[in-house]
Image (spheres, rainbow, N blue to C red):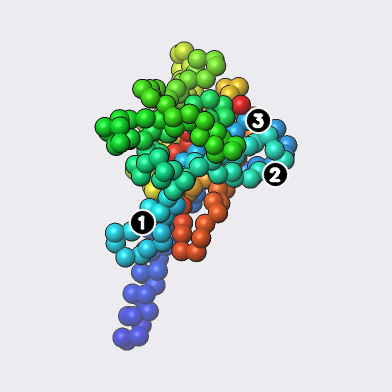
Amino acid sequence: MTNRRTLIVSIAILITTTIIVALFGIVPLPEYGELSSENNFDGKIIYHIEIQSENIIPPAPDIIDSCIFYIDLSKDLIKEEKVICNSDLYNFSYDINFYDAQIYSEDQVLLSYWDYQAGDERKGLVVDLKSGDISKDVNNIFFVEKSKMNVYGEKLINPWETSDYNSRVIGVYYVDRINNIEVFKSRAPSNYFFESLHWSPDGNNIVAGDSENNLIIFSKNKSFFPIKIDLDAELQEEESFELIEVLGWTN
């Protein structure tokens, strides 16, 4: 009798669990296509990552370095190229601010730092994208708000404003002069999100970073399925990285 009761309870638990999983189960990550030479993208995508330790004991992880990388989409072989890291700039300052890094020109990145020898003066470094050379030491720098508007006057909407993480729905949208236009919408895990949306130089495509350390390229007109670019920074053992921000997409 006891065995029968145990069996009935076990079956009931199994059925209940199955129903709960079916109704409220794990939502998979969105599906994306892979980048290929047929996509014919041009320009460079520039982004900021942090290299971190893989500590499991709090406080963790430790930030080992901050770096700027880029990917040249016009090349047949897509390869991540390092521009510069915080550790390369210790001769200027130990307080380089990578969080407000901006694209200075198509092939240059602007970083700010505090020059304590000059009386806590904020200065800027302009770094060449390809060589990593510092071409200028800029005084009186001005950091402008990053534009979310393309050449057609269409403006990207912050993904935090259009995604409902409680219902596990995320999306990418932009505004034309009249309407909000949906570019992409999908269910996703509650801890999955997009950030740092930027237009391509021709205004027809959009790049975003995601919480899985990928770059995602969307077609404004949905002319192709969203494409994922896996990032794989060169790391030492016991290191990981986090995509902090996409700085932009240049020619």
The residue under label 3 is which amino acid type?
A: Asp
How many other residues sit within 10 Å of disc 2, few (<14), some (14-19) or many (≥20)? Answer: few
Q: Nearer the viewer, residue 202 or 158?
A: 202
Q: Which mark is residue 21?
A: none
Numbered mark located on residue 77 in the image:
2
Find numbered disc 2 in the image and state the secondary structure of the residue it sits on.
Answer: loop
Question: What's the distance in space between the residues labelled 2 and 1, CA to CA?
Answer: 32 Å
Instruction: Identify the residue under disc 1.
Output: 62
Residue position for label 3: 42
Numbered-mark total: 3
The residues bearing labels 3 and 2 have C-alpha atoms spaced at a distance of 13 Å
Q: Is residue 91 visible?
A: yes
Chain-order first, disc 2 or disc 1: 1
Q: Which percent across, then down, holds residue 51?
A: 44, 52
Residue 158 lies, in percent from the top left, at: 40, 30
In primary-sequence order, the first of circles 1 and 3 is 3
Q: Residue furthest front?
A: 117
**Counting other residues with Cα less than 10 Å from the Cα at mark 3, is it few (<14), some (14-19), or many (20 or more)?**
some
Q: Nearer the viewer, residue 221 or 249?
A: 249
Q: CA distance from mark 1 to mark 3?
A: 36 Å
